[in-house]
């Protein structure tokens, strides 16, 4: 494609951000605040805060099927339908499976949200910092490669992100889950507090805390300046929050970037590849295909941030080939697309509890009780590597309650409004160990609707490590619930495919050595210094914490480095 000088100038920016989700929104905010004219590319449609949340205030009876997804739609979306957030009121924020095919060499449920804001509209909003136990684990335990950074490198950036996003939580003083900059915490209910006290009584190495989450319990001026308000505890978050009570790119970072006057947002823009200039030895721009017209065009910039979400970021780099990089941009090491890892969610369970009959709780709290990982924290103690967080919640539901088939009128109303006994749901979030065989690559024969090679996913569990970890969780969760006096305890294995955790990470990992990694300590490609990757693709290992807070902190840190380098004319 040839452009004259004036036309090319119109297509040129200081920076390009690929993706508008959690990390892309942060890249846009930081770049625009630094004064850089920034183009944000999003492959899906635009979603404007409030006005494009069509079901946010709908009652069940306002929806055509009262919230249930029609059978035909379920059959057409066999992957998306498995996501916890997918239903009739939220389906508009998920891709249609048949419109965006990929090839599963092993079962992998790739959950995607192709719109402005990406999956920040439908994320679970749980936010925990990493500690040095996670950053040091690969080097200590001999898996993956050593992280090129440590907790102290990221700590000030965690604080920056937390203050802007708004994270509720307590200063818990947990030795392996650092405290942060918190808004007032949500409260454990009476049964959760009872279990918390039981754990404190029976275990020296375990601590139950209220979950830390990206919800405004008490907005500060910085949140009001964003136009956001207090969380209403409705738990209808996945429809889009008209109050701005939870953090999304749509309600926070993207509008903040836009108000600088430095952001250009271009939806309906599928990124084909990154353009590499052989003479200059750096990337000069991005090839884009218009989603609707299929027209290919090019945009140019001094620096490029790749934030398309983990697997799509891998896809873009793999498809960015040149004479210099025949295996994908920056891929001298041959590591691109490899060592994909995720979180092990397979183990869960539950129980009932007799007591607290006169106690209840207010609202639909957007978080649960958490127990930071207690396995293999300081040293190897078990027959599996690494550990897992535990999350649990107690509620009063309909289990064990009598049904009233013969009543009607006032009797039916009274009987059906009676609350049932207490129950507990408990689950694991386990760290998986990155393995070279867990990878993605491009198909040489099949393309999508825009002529881009389809992604092949070859990602699976480790039958040894991951299943041993789940077994340990089952044993420990059963013991914890037993000691707390719970009854009817059961444990289950969902046997769900990887991907449904929606925490896939890796493939463009950070590292100290360019021979075994793609990115350096500042999220730069080792061999293409003006390209940065700061979404889940950059992760060297996955820890056991929810990852989005770390993606945002890494992004803010990398933008500062990139903008300083531009000023020094190093890029």
Image (cartoon, rainbow, N blue to C red):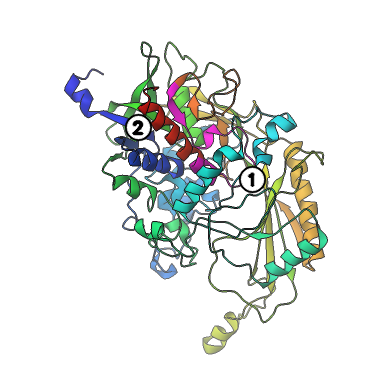
Residue 73 colored magenta? no
The numbered mark at residue 312 is none
Magenta stretch: give its range: 529-553
- Identify which residue is drawn at 52% across, 44% down: 156
Dot 2: few (<14), some (14–19), or many (≥20) neighbours within 10 Å? many
- Identify which residue is drawn at 38% across, 25% down: 568
In the structure shown, which secondary structural element does the residue marked by tag 2 occupy? strand
Indicate the position of residue 276 as horizontal and vertical percent values: 38, 18
In the rendered structure, the answer to whether residue 378 lies left or right of residue 166 reads right
Residue occupying the far front of the picture: 568
Dot 1: few (<14), some (14–19), or many (≥20) neighbours within 10 Å? some
Indicate the position of residue 6 as horizontal and vertical percent values: 17, 23
Quarter placement of the C terminus? top left
Is 6 placed above or below 113 here? Answer: above
The CA distance from mark 2 to mark 1 is: 36 Å
Near-viewer residue (155 or 237): 155
- Can residue 467 be seen in this snapshot? yes
In the rendered structure, the answer to whether residue 10 lies left or right of residue 145 reads left
Q: Earlier in the sequence, mark 2 or mark 1?
A: 2
Is 187 placed above or below 258 here? Answer: below
Near-viewer residue (95 or 68): 95
Judged by depth in the image, the label closer to the viewer, 2 or 1, is 2
The numbered mark at residue 16 is 2
Q: How many marks?
A: 2
Indicate the position of residue 495 as horizontal and vertical percent values: 68, 45
Residue 535 colored magenta? yes
Near-viewer residue (425 or 5): 5
Q: Quadrant of residue 433?
A: top right
Q: Which residue is mark 1?
A: 496
Is 538 placed above or below 349 here? Answer: above
In the rendered structure, the answer to whether residue 85 lies left or right of residue 46 reads right
């Amino acid at each position: 494609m040839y452009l004259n000088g004036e036309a090319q100038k119109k297509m040129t920016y200081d920076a390009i951000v690929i993706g508008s989700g959690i990390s892309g929104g942060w890249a846009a905010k930081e770049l625009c605040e630094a004064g850089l004219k920034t183009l944000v590319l999003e492959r899906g449609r635009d979603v404007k805060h409030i006005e494009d949340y069509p079901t946010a205030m709908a009652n069940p009876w306002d929806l055509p099927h009262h919230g249930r997804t029609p059978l035909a739609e379920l059959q057409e979306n066999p992957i998306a339908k498995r996501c916890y957030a997918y239903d009739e009121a939220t389906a508009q924020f998920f891709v249609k499976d048949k419109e965006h095919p990929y090839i599963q060499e092993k079962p992998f449920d790739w959950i995607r949200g192709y719109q402005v804001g990406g999956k920040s509209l439908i994320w679970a909003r749980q936010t925990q910092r990493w500690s040095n136990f996670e950053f040091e684990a690969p080097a200590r335990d001999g898996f993956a490669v050593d992280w090129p950074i440590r907790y102290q490198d990221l700590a000030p950036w965690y604080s920056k992100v937390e203050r802007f996003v708004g994270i509720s939580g307590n200063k818990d003083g947990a030795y392996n889950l650092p405290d942060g900059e918190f808004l007032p915490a949500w409260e454990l209910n009476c049964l959760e507090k009872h279990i918390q006290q039981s754990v404190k009584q029976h275990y020296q190495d375990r601590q139950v805390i209220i979950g830390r989450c990206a919800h405004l319990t008490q907005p500060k001026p910085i949140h009001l300046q964003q136009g956001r308000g207090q969380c209403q505890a409705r738990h209808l978050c996945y429809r889009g929050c008209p109050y701005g009570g939870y953090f999304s790119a749509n309600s926070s970072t993207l509008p903040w970037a836009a108000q600088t006057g430095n952001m250009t947002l271009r939806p309906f823009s599928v990124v084909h590849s990154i353009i590499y200039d052989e003479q200059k030895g750096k990337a000069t721009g991005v090839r884009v295909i218009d989603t609707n017209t299929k027209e290919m065009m090019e945009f140019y910039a001094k620096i490029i941030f790749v934030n398309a979400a983990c697997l799509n970021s891998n896809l873009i780099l793999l498809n960015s080939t040149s004479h210099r990089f025949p295996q994908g941009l920056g891929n001298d090491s041959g590591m691109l697309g490899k060592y994909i890892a995720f979180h092990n969610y397979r183990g869960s369970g539950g129980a009932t509890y007799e007591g607290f009959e006169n106690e209840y709780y207010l609202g639909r709290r957007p978080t649960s009780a958490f127990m930071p990982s207690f396995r293999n924290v300081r040293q190897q103690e078990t027959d599996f590597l690494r550990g897992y967080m535990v999350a649990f919640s107690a509620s009063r539901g309909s289990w064990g309650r009598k049904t009233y088939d013969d009543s009607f009128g006032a009797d039916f109303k009274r009987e059906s409004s009676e609350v049932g006994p207490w129950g507990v749901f408990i689950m694991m979030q386990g760290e998986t160990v990155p393995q070279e065989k867990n990878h993605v690559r491009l198909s040489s024969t099949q393309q999508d609707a825009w002529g881009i090679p389809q992604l092949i996913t070859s990602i699976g569990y480790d039958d040894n490590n991951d299943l041993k970890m789940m077994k340990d969780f089952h044993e420990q969760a059963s013991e914890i619930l037993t000691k707390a006096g719970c009854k009817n305890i059961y444990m289950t294995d969902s046997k769900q495919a990887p991907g449904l955790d929606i925490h896939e990470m890796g493939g463009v990992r950070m590292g100290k050595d360019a021979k075994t990694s793609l990115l350096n300590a500042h999220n730069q490609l080792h061999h293409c210094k003006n390209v940065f990757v700061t979404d889940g693709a950059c992760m060297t290992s996955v820890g056991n914490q929810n990852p989005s807070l770390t993606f945002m902190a890494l992004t803010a840190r990398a933008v500062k480095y990139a903008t300083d380098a531009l000023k020094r004319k190093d890029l």
